[in-house]
Image (cartoon, rainbow, N blue to C red):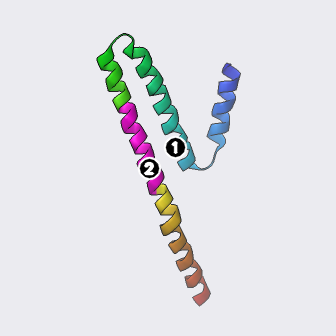
Amino acid sequence: MMSIIKQLLIDWNSEKNQRIKLQQAYLVIVALMAIASGLVTLVNISLGRTIIMFAAILALVYIVNSISWLVLDMIVSKKIDLIAKAHGKKR
């Protein structure tokens, strides 16, 4: 089991795209917080609710981050490429 986890971490670390790494880290942390919240709720309901609220906030951050990168890739990056191509043709 440890070797599988170690290999997963090595593969994850070899990923070059930092945005994908960040998004995957958000999802893993949200999932772990949800599991921890469920376990803690068995002992302390108030603390369990607090943990799940933080997980919900982190999930919201994940969604906002995804949308912002999508907008950046679709709109801004294409315009920058068009400007760079147009500028390159003038030279």
62 and 6: which one is in front?
Answer: 62
Q: Residue furthest left?
A: 46
Helix, strand or loop for disc 1: helix
* Badge number at residue 65: 2
Helix, strand or loop for disc 2: helix
Is residue 75 found left or right of 58 in the rendered image?
right
2 and 62: which one is in front?
Answer: 62
Residue 89 x, y percent position in the rendering: 61, 87
- Measured along the vertical axis of the image, is residue 63 above or below residue 81? above
Q: Classify mark 2: residues with Cα within 10 Å, few (<14), some (14-19) or many (20+).
A: some
Q: Quadrant of the C terminus?
A: bottom right
Quarter holding residue 4:
top right
Magenta residue check for 65: yes
Is residue 14 found left or right of 53 in the rendered image?
right
Kindly identify which residue carries mark 1: 23
Give yes or no for contact between labels 2 and 1 (Cβ–Cβ under 8 Å): yes
Total tally of numbered discs in the picture: 2
The amino acid marked with disc number 1 is: Gln
Magenta residue check for 75: no
Residue 69 x, y percent position in the rendering: 48, 56
For the point 40% across and 38% down, the residue is 58
Q: Is residue 91 visible?
A: no
Residue 19 x, y percent position in the rendering: 53, 49
**Residue stretch in magenta:** 54-68
For the point 48% across and 51% down, the residue is 66
- Measured along the vertical axis of the image, is residue 75 above or below residue 22? below
The amino acid marked with disc number 2 is: Asn
Q: Quadrant of the N terminus?
A: top right
Quarter holding residue 21:
top right
For the point 39% across and 11% down, the residue is 42
